Image (cartoon, rainbow, N blue to C red):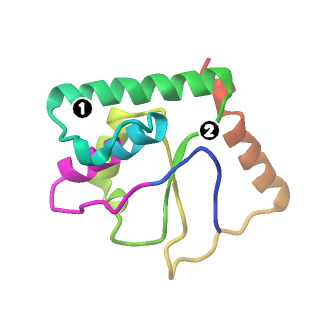
Amino acid sequence: MDLIGRGRIKLTNLESGFGTDQPVDDILLDVAHHFKTEIKREDLRLNSAKKALFIDLIDEELYDCGKHKHRHHYILVDEDEKSPLRRPSVYDELRELLPRLKILYQQASGENPLLLRETRLITIIRGFLNLPDTLR
């Protein structure tokens, strides 16, 4: 399944490392760059003040887009098992920092495919597209 849209936030090659700080910082930089293209990843080194600023910027953008139904923004985690977002610690920290950010996972190779009735799939997709209505 390929999920492409204008709201998809593309991540650069993330440093996996052993901790959560580097992957989460890389994701924050990518998401901030998605909303404000003048932010250049190469020019930034995150300190706690910049990190807090980026989190506020991203949260405000996600809130405004949801409130005004501009666009759904999401990160698509591909089936690459080595993605840091497949680690529960990285996922949990990112969800804590940015609860409005949607993270979608593609099926990993070797897993059983998800089988749904077409009507159920349509209901799920409509629910995703109507998420901004529930944020009010």
Q: Which image quarter is the N terminus in? A: bottom right
Q: Position of residue 122 (x, y in %)?
A: 80, 51
Which kind of residue does numbered mark 2 sit on?
Answer: His
Which kind of residue does numbered mark 1 sit on?
Answer: Lys
Q: Position of residue 18 (x, y in %)?
A: 15, 61
Q: Residue at x 63, y 46 (%)?
A: 6
Residue 44 is drawn in which quadrant? top left
Mark before the other along the chain sequence, 2 or 1: 1
Q: Residue at x 54, y 69 (%)?
A: 107
Label 2 – label 1 distance at C-alpha: 23 Å
Q: Residue furthest bottom?
A: 110
Which residue is under mark 2? Answer: 72
Indicate whether 60 appears above or below 42: above
Q: Which image quarter is the C terminus in? A: top right
Which residue is under mark 1? Answer: 51
Secondary structure of the residue carrying tag 1 is helix
Inspect the magenta stretch and tell me whether residue 26 lies in it: yes
Inspect the magenta stretch and tell me whether residue 12 lies in it: yes
Part of the protein shown in magenta: 11-28
Q: Residue furthest right?
A: 119
Indicate whether 21 appears above or below 101: below
